[in-house]
Image: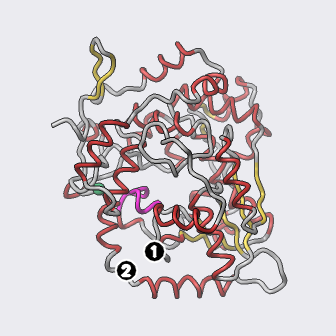
């Protein structure tokens, strides 16, 4: 998709998703220019809605059989771990780990890349997850370095979560090789949100090329690796954020699965599962920027993350939540449009002081940075402030 076609926002005719959703993999998020890779809306329908159509024809019994065959191949009898399960302790990780251990009788090791700042509910849910009977390794990156990288990613890319995404992506393959576990399973039902773009990318196996790179030309927070010393970040500090180098052979021996390809579940069903089987709690209040209470609860920077989406693409957390509920027939498209109009892009005020403190910037600098990322084709400023020019609720 070229730059010009991005300027015209197209909304899916079935849900409220638009063609503005980024499609880049983490390597593509290195510079501003690479944000240009967007989802396509062939025939006016988004990839996630097409997947929901396709889902009706899937034979789930066959898919589960296929899964069990793979699990049997990797099952160990010496008591050691046979599967690595990355997760945060939210509803998706609870479902994933519970079913692998208690239904399929695997011996999982769960692993977690720590959030920037745990919320109370996030920490509660993380501990509740372990109390369901799981071993967990929590990797907490050096907070001094993680803060610096997050600030660079915020200032240069308006993508404060980039270092988190990078670190989290590489943690699983690194630990799998180190601990000699040759199976990794991811539980996030991302097909349903349109991540991965279109049906052609949907597969039971994750693209392992994401895990390694032999390039020296890496960027972090929009800064080339050779320039990071200026910010007092050494190569040694970067170790958790580096892709695996010269490890293609070892990586290619790993089996890396997407569980939603094999089992029929979705974020709503995971929420009910988690509520029934664990001490999982939702917030007593709705999350900022949306009307829901049950997803992405663990990090005080989550609300900022979704707010930056909204600034850059005009689609925020309510768009994502409402689109998914339309696909699951929980709400209608008309209801979704009203919810998007009401909640999308709400300012992240709940933890705003902590966000400023974490990023070590003034409120003024924060606002200036945000405003510098508003694309002209999406935003106009009038006497009441910034307004979207194109939105699903604007006729
Ligand atoms: Zn759609």
Label 2 Cα neighbours within 10 Å, binned few <14 / some 14-19 / many ≥20? few
Q: Nearer the viewer, residue 91 or 247?
A: 91
Pointer 1: what residue?
264
Where residue 86 appears, as percent x and y from the top left, is 66, 61
Q: Nearer the viewer, residue 94 or 191?
A: 94
In the rendered image, residue 193 lying in the magenta stretch gets the answer yes
**Residue furthest right as drawn:** 78
Where residue 75 appears, as percent x and y from the top left, is 71, 83
Whole-number angstrom distance, CA of label 2 to CA of label 1:
9 Å
- Using the rendered image of the protein, determine whether residue 268 is visible from the camera's viewpoint: yes
The answer to whether the beta carbon of the residue marked 2 is less than 8 Å from any atom of ligand 1 is no
- Position of 200 with respect to 286 (left or right) is left
Residue at x 83% of width, y 80% of height = 79
Residue 45 versus residue 22 in the image, above or below = below
Residue 82 versus residue 6 in the image, above or below = below
Residue contact at pointers 2 and 1, CB within 8 angstroms: yes
Residue at x 33% of width, y 67% of height = 52
Residue 166 versus residue 208 in the image, above or below = above
Residue 30 shows which numbered tag? none
Helix, strand or loop status at disc 2:
loop
Helix, strand or loop status at disc 1:
loop
- The image quadrant that residue 133 belongs to is bottom right
- Using the rendered image of the protein, determine whether residue 245 is visible from the camera's viewpoint: no
Q: Which residues are magenta?
A: 190-198
Where residue 257 appears, as percent x and y from the top left, is 57, 71
Residue 58 shows which numbered tag? 2
Label 1 Cα neighbours within 10 Å, binned few <14 / some 14-19 / many ≥20? some
Where residue 378 appears, as percent x and y from the top left, is 29, 30
Residue at x 49% of width, y 70% of height = 260
């Amino acid at each position: 998709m070229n730059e010009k076609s991005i300027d015209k926002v197209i909304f899916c005719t079935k849900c409220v998703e638009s063609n503005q959703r980024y499609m880049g993999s983490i390597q593509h998020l290195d510079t501003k220019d690479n944000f240009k890779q967007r989802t396509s809306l062939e025939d006016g329908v988004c990839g996630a809605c097409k997947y929901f159509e396709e889902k009706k024809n899937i034979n789930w019994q066959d898919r589960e059989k296929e899964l069990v065959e793979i699990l049997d191949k990797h099952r160990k009898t010496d008591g050691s771990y046979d599967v690595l399960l990355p997760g945060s302790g939210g509803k998706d990780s609870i479902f994933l780990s519970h079913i692998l251990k208690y239904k399929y009788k695997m011996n999982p090791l769960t692993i977690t890349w720590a959030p920037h700042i745990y919320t109370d509910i996030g920490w509660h849910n993380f501990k509740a997850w372990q109390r369901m009977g799981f071993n967990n390794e929590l990797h907490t990156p050096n907070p001094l370095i993680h803060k610096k990288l997050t600030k660079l990613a915020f200032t240069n890319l308006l993508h404060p979560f980039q270092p988190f995404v990078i670190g989290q992506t590489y943690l699983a393959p690194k630990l799998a090789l180190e601990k000699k576990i040759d199976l990794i399973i991811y539980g996030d039902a991302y097909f349903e949100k349109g991540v991965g773009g279109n049906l052609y990318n949907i597969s039971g196996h994750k693209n392992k090329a994401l895990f390694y790179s032999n390039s020296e030309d890496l960027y972090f927070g929009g800064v080339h690796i050779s320039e990071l010393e200026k910010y007092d970040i050494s190569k040694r500090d970067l170790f958790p954020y580096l892709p695996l180098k010269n490890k293609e052979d070892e990586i290619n021996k790993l089996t890396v699965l997407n569980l939603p390809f094999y089992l029929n579940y979705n974020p709503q069903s995971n929420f009910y599962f988690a509520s029934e089987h664990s001490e999982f709690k939702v917030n007593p209040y709705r999350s900022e920027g949306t009307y829901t209470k049950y997803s992405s609860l663990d990090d005080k920077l989550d609300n900022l993350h979704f707010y930056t989406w909204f600034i850059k693409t005009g689609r925020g957390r309510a768009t994502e939540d409402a689109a998914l509920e339309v696909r699951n027939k929980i709400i209608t498209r008309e209801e979704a449009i009203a919810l998007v109009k009401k909640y999308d892009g709400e300012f992240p005020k709940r933890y705003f002081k902590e966000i400023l403190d974490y990023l070590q910037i003034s409120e003024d600098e924060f606002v200036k940075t945000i405003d510098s990322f508003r694309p002209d084709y999406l935003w106009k400023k009038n006497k009441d402030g910034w307004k979207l020019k194109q939105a699903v609720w604007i006729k």
